[in-house]
């Protein structure tokens, strides 16, 4: 199920899909804020895709799979937790770490020139 795009002020056009998951507005807003707002670390990021699903059989947990990309860059992260908000926060943190690391490398390379 596709649930639409992120806030209008986000530079990252974010597509949010679900697999057997009833996505409420609070979780959608958290995804838009935490993952759709990652362009603050790298301006060239302009698209993203997040899938929210159930994992784990009888002890079902929320799984968040997220990708963001732009020209020359693609970052991916996922997290699974019993608390959906925690899974979003952790996936967003993993993406932010990757993006900041890459951005730092690019700044270092540019400074060496």
Image (cartoon, rainbow, N blue to C red):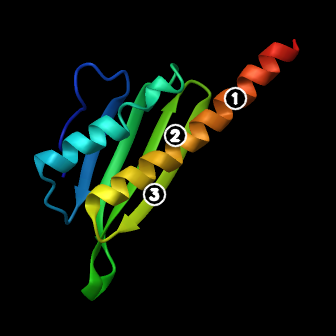
Q: List the single residue furthest toward the top.
A: 113
Residue highlighted by disc 1: 104
Question: Residue 28: percent from the left, percent from the top?
Answer: 20, 45
Residues under numbered marks 1 and 2 in contact, where contact means CB atoms less than 8 Å apart: no
Image disc number at residue 48: none
Q: Which badge, 1 or 2, comes first in the chain's sequence?
A: 2
What residue lies at 30% left-to-right and 71% top-to-bottom? 82
Label 3: element kind: strand
Label 2: element kind: helix
Say left or right for 21 vs 91.
Answer: left
What residue lies at 72% left-to-right and 24% top-to-bottom? 106
Front position among marks 3 and 1? 1
Image disc number at residue 96: 2
Question: Residue 11: percent from the left, percent from the top?
Answer: 37, 21
Nearest the viewer among 42 and 53 is 42
Q: Which badge, 3 or 1, comes first in the chain's sequence?
A: 3
What residue lies at 56% left-to-right and 24% top-to-bottom? 71
Question: Residue 79: percent from the left, percent from the top?
Answer: 43, 61
User: Which image quarter is the C terminus in?
Assistant: top right
What residue lies at 27% left-to-right and 19% top-to-bottom? 9
* Few, some or many residues within 10 Å of mark 1 (<14, 14–19, 20+): few
Height in image: 98 above or below 7?
below
Q: Which badge, 3 or 2, comes first in the chain's sequence?
A: 3
Front position among marks 3 and 2? 2
Question: Residue 73: percent from the left, percent from the top?
Answer: 59, 32
Residue highlighted by disc 3: 78
Residue 23 location, quadrant: bottom left
Distance from label 1 to label 2 (Cα)? 12 Å
* Few, some or many residues within 10 Å of mark 2 (<14, 14–19, 20+): many
């Amino acid at each position: 199920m596709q649930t639409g795009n992120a806030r209008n002020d986000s530079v990252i056009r974010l597509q949010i899909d679900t697999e057997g998951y009833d996505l409420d507005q609070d979780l959608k807003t958290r995804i838009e804020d935490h993952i759709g707002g990652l362009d603050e670390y790298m301006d060239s990021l302009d698209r993203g895709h997040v899938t929210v699903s159930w994992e784990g059989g009888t002890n079902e947990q929320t799984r968040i799979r997220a990708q963001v990309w732009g020209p020359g860059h693609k970052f991916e992260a996922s997290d699974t937790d019993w608390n959906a908000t925690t899974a979003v926060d952790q996936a967003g943190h993993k993406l932010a770490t990757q993006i900041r690391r890459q951005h730092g490398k690019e700044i270092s390379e540019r400074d060496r020139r």
